[in-house]
């Protein structure tokens, strides 16, 4: 099977099975999504969604969060992994949005990575989810699943995986493919015990062929 055929199978499958795939983070504004994605680093979306309602009730926008004190905000995120750093990042991020971006979340990767707590992966998530830009955020799920399916080959880093996926995916599906790979990795192609018996992508999967 050629690389082109492999990608075509992948796109056709998820276009039918999950045409409306989207993030599982719950938010009401670009700012709230940015906060949620920062909190989700090395933490589950489920835990983040349990934490953010109280956080957003008190700090719904950059102005309110930027004026928060660490001792006020920290208790609201203490159940999240690395709460000390994340609390500091959130306050600093909100202040910079106020000072440099008129309180609005910028929509370019170059601008977003200037914000505390925001790396390339987070910036790619924000721009693809909010603005449907053809940017591919590569987390552990995307990295693992794309390699197992043979969509990427020999990629040793998330950036290398990102570049291969962007090269072969049509621009109009990149923002959806990000969610396809994440959700498939979260619920089917799990790290330790993938549910190969119920997976509809076995025809292109290099991993299932290897273990069988």
Image (cartoon, rainbow, N blue to C red):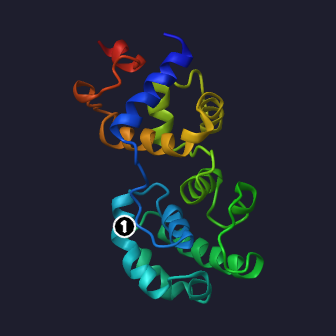
Q: Between residue 92 and residue 165, name the one nearer to us.
A: 165
Q: Between residue 125 and residue 11, name the one nearer to us.
A: 11
Q: Between residue 138 and residue 166, name the one nearer to us.
A: 166
Where's residue 127, x and y in %?
Answer: 62, 56
Q: How many marks?
A: 1
Which residue occupies the extreme top position in the image?
Answer: 1
Secondary-structure class at tag 1: helix
Where's residue 193, x and y in %?
Answer: 28, 32
- The answer to whether residue 92 is above or below residue 140 is below
Q: Is residue 149 in sight in this rendering?
A: no
Residue 54, quarter of the rendered image: bottom left
Where's residue 137, x and y in %?
Answer: 57, 46
Label 1 sits on residue: 49
- The answer to whether residue 56 is above or below residue 138 is below
Where's residue 83, x and y in %?
Answer: 48, 70
Please tell me which residue is depicted at 63% across the width and 61% down the height of the picture: 118
Please tell me which residue is depicted at 56% across the width and 82% down the height of the picture: 61
Say left or right for 72 vs 183: right
């Amino acid at each position: 099977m050629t690389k082109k055929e492999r990608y075509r199978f992948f796109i056709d499958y998820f276009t039918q099975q999950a045409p409306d795939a989207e993030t599982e983070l719950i938010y009401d504004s670009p700012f709230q999504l940015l906060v949620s994605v920062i909190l989700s680093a090395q933490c589950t979306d489920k835990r983040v969604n349990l934490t953010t309602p109280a956080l957003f009730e008190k700090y719904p926008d950059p102005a309110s969060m930027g004026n928060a004190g660490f001792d006020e905000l920290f208790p609201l995120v203490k159940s999240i992994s690395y709460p000390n750093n994340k609390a500091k990042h959130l306050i600093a991020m909100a202040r910079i949005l106020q000072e440099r971006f008129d309180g609005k979340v910028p929509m370019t990767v170059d601008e977003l990575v200037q914000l505390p707590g925001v790396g390339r992966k987070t910036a790619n998530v924000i721009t693809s989810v909010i603005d449907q830009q053809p940017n591919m955020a590569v987390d552990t799920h995307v990295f693992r699943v794309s390699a197992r399916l043979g969509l990427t080959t020999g990629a040793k880093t998330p950036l290398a995986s990102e570049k291969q996926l962007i090269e072969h995916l049509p621009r109009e599906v990149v923002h959806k493919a990000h969610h396809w790979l994440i959700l498939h990795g979260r619920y089917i192609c799990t790290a330790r015990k993938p549910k190969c018996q119920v997976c509809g992508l076995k025809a292109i999967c290099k991993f299932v062929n290897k273990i069988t």
